Image (cartoon, rainbow, N blue to C red):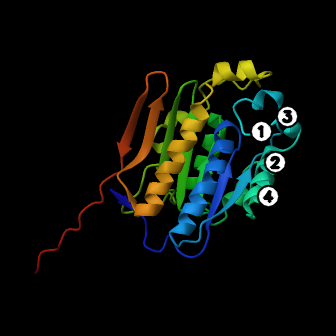
């Protein structure tokens, strides 16, 4: 069982950065609306979301991502956040750029990464664990292949700092996620059919649902039993990784 600090949730809005609003990211940001409203219903401050993505909407994005043909050629983050703010009376922010060192240094309560390359994860890992960058309280990383996916919630920390009850981050549990020596297909999908051959129709929605549900249970209950979830749509399988047990305090013998 892993618990939140008592002062994590309050009347202030949690500062959330979403890195990448493509297949998973666009679904997840849309889900964050429900999480925001749910937290407010419980008396908390909700979420203040900032979405980062330098890419524009292409025809290959239309089927799996939350964009339409009228969005073609426009920046993904700006399109998505504008639509959410207009429909839900929110004031979330869009940054049509990459998540670089400058925004990484901000005091984010939660960073959610929805990136699709090992190089991008390696950079996020350097931000989360590098000297001068330790500003994030939680890091939720998401990823998927054709039919499989994973969601891992971790606690970033300074390389010289040992947290008593830390949650391993995705890049600690699975270093291969940031191993840039492994070849990966960076070729752009030129059509929706080609994109569906690389990632199944509902895989991104499944990742986003599991990620949002994990955050909801943590924020609602103040604790979680598992901090990582894995699934395979092809076999209808689902697995979870228990959160590390908090070490018991030992009393010193009287002298």
The residue nearer to you, when weighing 116 against 132, is 116
Is disc 1 in contact with disc 4, using a CB cutoff of under 8 Å?
Answer: no
Residue named by callout 3: 69
Mark 2 and mark 1: span between their CA atoms? 8 Å
Asked if marks 1 and 3 touch (Cβ < 8 Å), the reply is: no
Q: Quadrant of the N terminus?
A: bottom left
Give the residue at x 47% y 44%: 172
Q: Position of residue 159 (x, y in %)?
A: 50, 57
What distance separates the C-alpha of mark 3 from that of mark 4?
Answer: 19 Å
- Using the rendered image of the protein, determine whether residue 161 is visible from the camera's viewpoint: no
According to the picture, the residue beneath numbered tag 4 turns out to be 86
Is the residue under label 1 in contact with that under label 2 (CB below 8 Å)? yes
Whether 79 is drawn above or below 23: the answer is below
Residue at (72, 18) in percent of width and height: 194
Q: Nearer the viewer, mark 2 or mark 4?
A: 4
Q: Can residue 16 be seen by looking at this rendering?
A: yes
Q: Quadrant of residue 209?
A: top right
* Whether label 2 touches label 4, CB < 8 Å: no
- SS at circle 4: helix
Residue 29 versus residue 102: which sits nearer the camera? 29
Sequence-first tag of 2 and 4: 2
Q: CA distance from mark 2 to mark 3?
A: 12 Å
Mark 1 vs mark 3, CA separation in Å = 7 Å
Where the C terminus falls, by quadrant? Answer: bottom left
Q: Which residue is depicted at the point 66% across and 40% down?
A: 120
In the picture of the structure, the residue carrying the numbered disc 2 is 79
Q: Earlier in the sequence, mark 2 or mark 1?
A: 1
In the depicted view, which residue is nearer to us: 135 or 115?
115
Label 3: few (<14), some (14–19) or many (≥20) C-alpha neighbours in 10 Å: few
Mark identifier at residue 67: 1
Residue 150 appears at what percent x and percent y? 50, 37
């Amino acid at each position: 069982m892993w618990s939140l600090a008592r002062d994590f949730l309050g009347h202030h809005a949690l500062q959330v950065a979403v890195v990448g609003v493509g297949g998973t990211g666009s679904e997840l940001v849309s889900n964050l609306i429900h999480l925001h409203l749910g937290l407010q219903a419980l008396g908390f401050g909700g979420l203040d979301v900032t979405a980062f993505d330098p890419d524009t909407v292409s025809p290959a994005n239309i089927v799996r991502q939350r964009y339409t043909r009228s969005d073609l050629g426009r920046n993904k983050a700006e399109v998505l956040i504008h639509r959410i703010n207009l429909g839900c009376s929110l004031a979330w922010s869009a940054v049509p750029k990459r998540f670089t060192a400058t925004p990484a240094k901000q005091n984010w309560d939660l960073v959610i990464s929805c990136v699709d390359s090992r190089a991008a994860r390696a950079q996020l890992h350097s931000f989360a664990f590098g000297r001068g960058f330790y500003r994030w309280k939680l890091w939720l990383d998401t990823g998927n292949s054709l039919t499989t996916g994973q969601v891992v919630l971790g606690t970033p920390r300074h390389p010289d700092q040992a947290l008593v009850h830390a949650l391993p981050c995705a890049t600690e549990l699975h270093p291969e996620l940031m191993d840039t020596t492994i070849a990966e297909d960076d070729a752009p999908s030129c059509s929706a059919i080609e994109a569906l051959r690389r990632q199944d129709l509902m895989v991104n929605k499944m990742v986003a649902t599991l990620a949002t549900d994990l955050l909801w249970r943590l924020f609602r209950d103040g604790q979680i039993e598992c901090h990582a979830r894995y699934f395979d749509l092809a076999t209808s399988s689902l697995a979870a990784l228990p959160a590390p047990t908090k070490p018991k305090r030992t009393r010193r013998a009287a002298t």
